[in-house]
Image: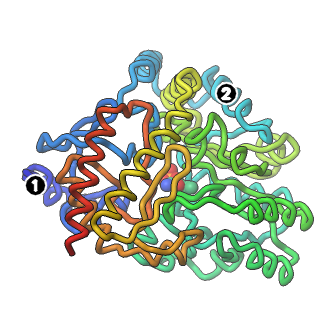
Amino acid sequence: MNTKNSEKLYKKGLVNLVGAVNSPVRAFSSVGGNPLFIDKAKGAYIKDVDGNKYIDLVLSYGPMILGHRNKKVEKAVTKAIKKGTSFGASTNAEIKLAKIVCDAFPGMDKVRFVNSGTEAVLSAIRLARAHTGKDKIIKFSGCYHGHMDAMLVAAGSGLATLSLPGSKGVPAQSVENTLIAEYNNLETVKAHFDKHDDIAGVILEPVTGNMGVVQPSDEFIKGLRALTKEKNALLICDEVMTGFRSKFGGAQELVGVEADITCLGKVIGGGFPVGAYGARNEIMENVAPLGGMYQAGTLSGNPIAMAAGISTLTELKHQNPYDKFNTVAEKIEKMLLSSAKKYGVDLVVNRFGSMINPFFTNKEVTNFTDAQTSDTDRFAKFFWAMIENGVFLPPSQFEAWFLSSTITMKELKKLEVSIEKSMLVVGNL
Ligand code: PMP
């Protein structure tokens, strides 16, 4: 495979960019080798700067749920650009997107748009503290909530990939109010509540994507809801990844829970930088200008991003690809498991709607400790074999693969061949 142009750009990028990337997971650190540079993408496919074409299962880590360059989104964005790109004053588009989002979440009366998932989470945490007058937050190991200081403890995503327990530059004081519990283990949450009476909230990915895909057990999620209610703490569902991914609305409805505060991002921006946090009126009224919790943004509610969000969600509602996602993901699961069996590879596949991922382990994966039993070297070999065979995957064992509504039988057939060839490579280790 020719990747000469990617290699050239990588070397050039190293001069003025840190590691030639603007987000660490793009550096391919855990799979080795040079990162690929992308030229363009369309529908279910992405093309690198050497002209290699791949089925794209990264999809910008989630936002491109309609595939790349959806015609309606492209038209809406182009139209918005012609009216001006940022005003520093409110627009009708913000009201429209807010209504679509609030209507899709039973527990959300008001929403505030920000520019990233990280901003959504840091604002949601400030809001939980403002509303309850308490300081501590419980998070789960393996869940990633963006790169705010207080959440860079036992985090998944790039931190799992790089095996970093946290991050340099985070003062001890910034994490002293963060308590860590184990996903799917209610007892570890109860233990914190027994010990502390100043817990403002519990934050979780209602289905995780950042330690790979892990679903909450019914007992865990229902128990979490009951416990937070009993202790007057808020339940924060970080749906930056899962929002509108597996149903129109949130994963929380599918797993049977209603959050007090919901964080969103990715899909609601249709490929533009958007995040959001929303809740019932009584909670959102803490936020300035209605209340005393300050949170602001020069480009928040940006008209181009709003246009992309409105058109993406409108088209998503129209296409309603969610049943198809389940069917496609089930087919991919079968392909993975049957190839793995054939070549004697230990493999567990977890999936939730349009999020799926194989763990190279023989242990059922219900939390971060289980996920970490995966053979990451084997994943790295599998990753490169899939690249060679025309499939672009997230370059980490601990990131979910994403599906878009543009995937068809043609791509599935190609995927089957690629999986079979790649599993053969890792099976011969
Ligand atoms: N929360 C979750 C669940 C995420 O998956 C991510 C990003 N992958 C974030 C927060 C942070 O979002 P962003 O990268 O847009 O800051």
Going 46% across and 36% down the picture, which residue do you hit?
A: 65
Indicate whether 321 appears above or below 48.
above
Q: CA distance from mark 1 to mark 2?
A: 44 Å
The quadrant in which the C terminus is found is bottom left
Q: Amino acid at mark 2?
A: Ile
**327 or 201, which is in the foreground?**
327
**346 or 127, which is in the foreground?**
346
Going 60% across and 68% down the picture, which residue do you hit?
A: 151
> Is disc 1 in contact with disc 2, using a CB cutoff of under 8 Å?
no
Going 44% across and 32% down the picture, which residue do you hit?
A: 405
Pointer 1: what residue?
A: 8
The local crowd at label 2, few if under 14, some if 14 to 19, many if 20 or more residues have their Cα within 10 Å, is some
- Dot 1 or dot 2: first in sequence order is 1
Please state if 421 lies on the left or on the right of 350 as rendered: left
Pointer 2: what residue?
A: 100
Residue 148 percent location from the top left of the image: 57, 64
Q: Amino acid at mark 1?
A: Lys
Residue 307 percent location from the top left of the image: 52, 24
Please state if 189 lies on the left or on the right of 324 as rendered: right
- Mark 2 close to ligand 1, CB under 8 Å: no
Please state if 61 lies on the left or on the right of 15 as rendered: right
